Amino acid sequence: MRKVIRPVDPVNTDASITTQHTKGRRYHKLQRLRRKRAHFRETHRSSPPEYLDPINLSTLNLDENQQKLLRKGPSFCPARKDINWQEVHDDIEAFEARLRTAVFFLEKEAAESNDNTEIQSHLPRVPRKKKWKPPTSKFPELELFLSNVRKDMLNPQNIRNVKDNLAK
């Protein structure tokens, strides 16, 4: 540490020396922290290591953009900044319809299996009408689950501002 010699102030000499000394120490500490932070950023901003280069085990050829995406690693999750609420609502409704349909046909198959000794298919029959919607389930647990999922998905407090990590 370099000390600067200054002329002695005749008034309050002890306080002025200690103040100058602490300011210098704080300044140097701040500079040291800035150097450490800059060094940390330089080492972590370097190009990805070679071991993250994707190894193609399939017969498909990967172009450069696909390889860049794979280099980001298995923990990379693309996230868009804007949310298409109509698409979210449609997805929730489709999810509810799939669950209610599965429960509806399982109930129906259970009732038919008591009447019929014939072996039933393990897959439920698909309704012929495309606009057909399954009725509300008789199981309150299913309806409670579906309402909680809908409430959690559409609750504005659960929406986090995510930094856009997709290239334009």
Image (cartoon, rainbow, N blue to C red):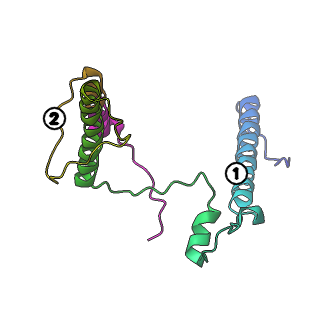
The residue beneath circle 1 is 37
Please state the horizontal and vertical placement of residue 11, each as a whole percent of the image. 70, 32
Front position in the image: 59 or 145:
59
Q: Any magenta on residue 85?
A: no
Spot occupied by residue 93 in the image (x, y as percentages of width and height): 23, 44
Q: Earlier in the sequence, mark 1 or mark 2?
A: 1
> Which of 29 and 123 lies nearest the eye of the viewer?
123
Instruction: Give the quarter of the image for residue 111.
Output: top left
Q: Amino acid at mark 1?
A: Arg
- In the image, residue 151 lies in the stretch drawn in magenta: yes
Q: How far across and down, in percent of the image, does residue 113 sit? A: 29, 28
Could you tell me if the residues under marks 1 and 2 are in contact, i.e. CB atoms within 8 Å? no
Q: How many marks?
A: 2
What range of the chain is rendered magenta? 148-168
| Label 1 vs label 2, nearer the camera | 2
Residue labelled with disc 2: 135
Residue at mark 1 to residue at mark 2: CA–CA distance: 60 Å
